[in-house]
Amino acid sequence: MSSKAKQTQKLLLFRLSGSRLFGLGTLKIREILPFQRLTHLPQSHRAVIGTATFRGSAVPVIDMAAAVGYPPMTQEELEQGSIIITDIQRKEIGFAVRSVNRIVETDWKSVMPPPKALGSNAFITGLLETDDEIIQLLDVELLIARVYPESLDAQEVMLTDVEGETLKELNILLVDDSVVARKQLSDVLDSKDITYHVTSNGNEAMQVLLDENRKGRPINILVSDIEMPGLDGYELAFNVRDDNALPQPYIILHTSLNSEMSLSYANQVGANEALTKFDANELLHAMLRGAQGGHQS
C-alpha cells in the first residue's frame, strides 16, 4: 500500500492507579499542566473535581481514575499529579492523572481491539504493546458520556419530506470503535427511519463495502471515525479510493478531533469531508450533500 495513507500516531502515556499505563492520542491534547488550585463546581458529577483556569477560560477537571472506576485520587496524589487539557467533541476538558509517563509513536495497525469479553461498558478502545508493556487506550467518548449523560440526549434535526426520502434511499455505512459514538450515529438515523449498516472497525467496514457491492447495492455514504484499531479512518478512505472496482461512496470522516486539524489530511486520502463530533444536523446535511451530486466516480 502507498505510504500516502499511513500516518503515525503519537500517544501520551500516563498512570491512573498502580503501574498500569494508559494512552491518549496527542491530537486530542491541548496542554499538560501541573496540578493547580481548582474552583469547586456545585451539583456536578462525583468525578468532576472542579474547574481550572486555562488561557483565560474555566475548564472542568475530571478525576480520570474515579471516572473509570478506580478509587478517587487523594489530595496529595492530586497535588503531585498533572492535568491533561484536551479538546474533544468541541469541548475543552481537563483530566487529572496520577503521573505522566512519556510520548510514544505508533500506527493504528499496531493497536489491537479490546477483548469482546470486556463488554460494552469497558473504557478501552484498544490495546498496544510497546517496550514489553501493554498500553490501554481510553475511550474518552464513553468516559465523557458517563460524566455528562446529557451529552447523549437525542438531537432533533428538521428535514423536509424530500430530504428525508432522499436519505432513506441511500445505502449508508457507519464505522466507529466507540460504543457511545455508534449509539449517537444510530439514534440520529433511527429517529428518521433511515436504514444503515454499522461496524466497529475499518476491516469490518471494508468487508461490508465489498459484500454490498457484490449484492448489487453499493454503499453510497461512508461515515467513519479516524482513530480506530487496525485499519483507521484515513487508511479505510484511501483503500476505498484505491479500489477501482468499487463504486465510490461519499466519504465523511467523523472525529472527536478538531475538524480543521483533520480536513487537510482527510482530503489527501480521498475523503470528501471531515466533521467534528457530534452535531446531528451537520452530519445529516453532509449526507445530503453526498446524495445531491457529491458521489465521486
Image (cartoon, rainbow, N blue to C red):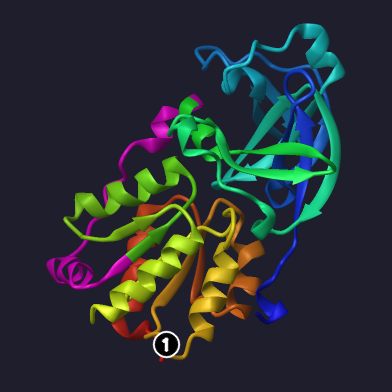
Q: Is residue 282 left or right of residue 196?
A: right
Q: Residue at x 68, y 41 (%)?
A: 86
Whether residue 111 appears in magenta in the rendering, the answer is no
Q: Is residue 43 left or right of residue 21?
A: left
Q: Is residue 25 above or below residue 235?
A: above
| Residue density around tag 1, few if under 14, some if 14–19, many if 20 or more, within 10 Å | some
| Residue matched to label 1 | 296
Q: Is residue 282 above or below residue 79?
A: below
Q: Quadrant of residue 38?
A: top right
Q: Residue at x 59, y 53 (%)?
A: 229
- Rendered-image quadrant of the C terminus: bottom left
Q: Residue at x 66, y 25 (%)?
A: 61
The answer to whether residue 198 shows anywhere in this view is yes
Of residues 48 and 269, the one nearer the viewer is: 269
Q: Is residue 173 left or right of residue 8?
A: left
Find residue 88 and report its horizontal and vertical position in percent: 59, 45
* SS assignment at label 1: loop
- Rendered-image quadrant of the N terminus: bottom right
Find residue 35 and report its horizontal and vertical position in percent: 82, 22
Q: Please report the bounds of the magenta region as a residue range.
A: 147-172
Q: Quadrant of residue 197?
A: bottom left
Of residues 117 and 275, the one nearer the viewer is: 117
Find residue 107 and report its horizontal and vertical position in percent: 71, 59
**Amino acid of disc 1:** Gln
Find residue 6 and report its horizontal and vertical position in percent: 69, 71
Whether residue 170 appears in magenta in the rendering, the answer is yes
